[in-house]
Image (cartoon, rainbow, N blue to C red):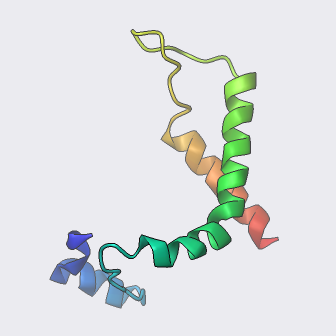
Amino acid sequence: AKCHLTKKVKDQFKSSHIGNYIIPPRMTNLIQPADVCWFASIKRALTTKWNNWFIHTEKTFTRNGNAKSPGYALVINWLSEIWKDLLN
């Protein structure tokens, strides 16, 4: 993202000891294997949690009758649980 090229962001990365690498456009075909390999288990676990929530939880609905999402806080909790499980 272009915002990662600003001095403020670069300084923050440096002070946090985070490497910043710019991936050129049209490189998806080269980096996709990493996405499939590294993130497949996280995506699978998140899909399982989402499906369980969707099937087993009473939901609220929008004005147009669509189910509302579980919300950011719950999804972040799910991701935290998934990450902890991966580390164990």
- Residue 20, relative to residue 25: is it above or below? below
**How many numbered marks appear?**
0
Q: Nearer the viewer, residue 27 or 74?
A: 27
The residue under the point 33% across, 90% down is 14
Q: Nearer the viewer, residue 5 or 33?
A: 33
Q: Residue furthest right?
A: 88
Quarter of the image with the C terminus in it: bottom right
The residue under the point 27% across, 69% down is 1
Residue 73 point in image, percent of width and height: 53, 42
Residue 74 point in image, percent of width and height: 59, 40
Q: Is residue 9 left or right of residue 67?
A: left
Residue 44 point in image, percent of width and height: 71, 53
- Residue 71, relative to residue 22: is it above or below? above
Q: Residue furthest left?
A: 7
- Residue 39, relative to residue 59: is it above or below? below
The residue under the point 34% across, 89% down is 15
Q: Nearer the viewer, residue 3 or 43?
A: 43
Q: Nearer the viewer, residue 71 or 35?
A: 35
Residue 2 point in image, percent of width and height: 21, 71
Q: Quarter-wise, where is residue 5 in the image? A: bottom left
Q: Quarter-wise, where is residue 42 in the image? A: bottom right
Q: Is residue 88 left or right of residue 16?
A: right
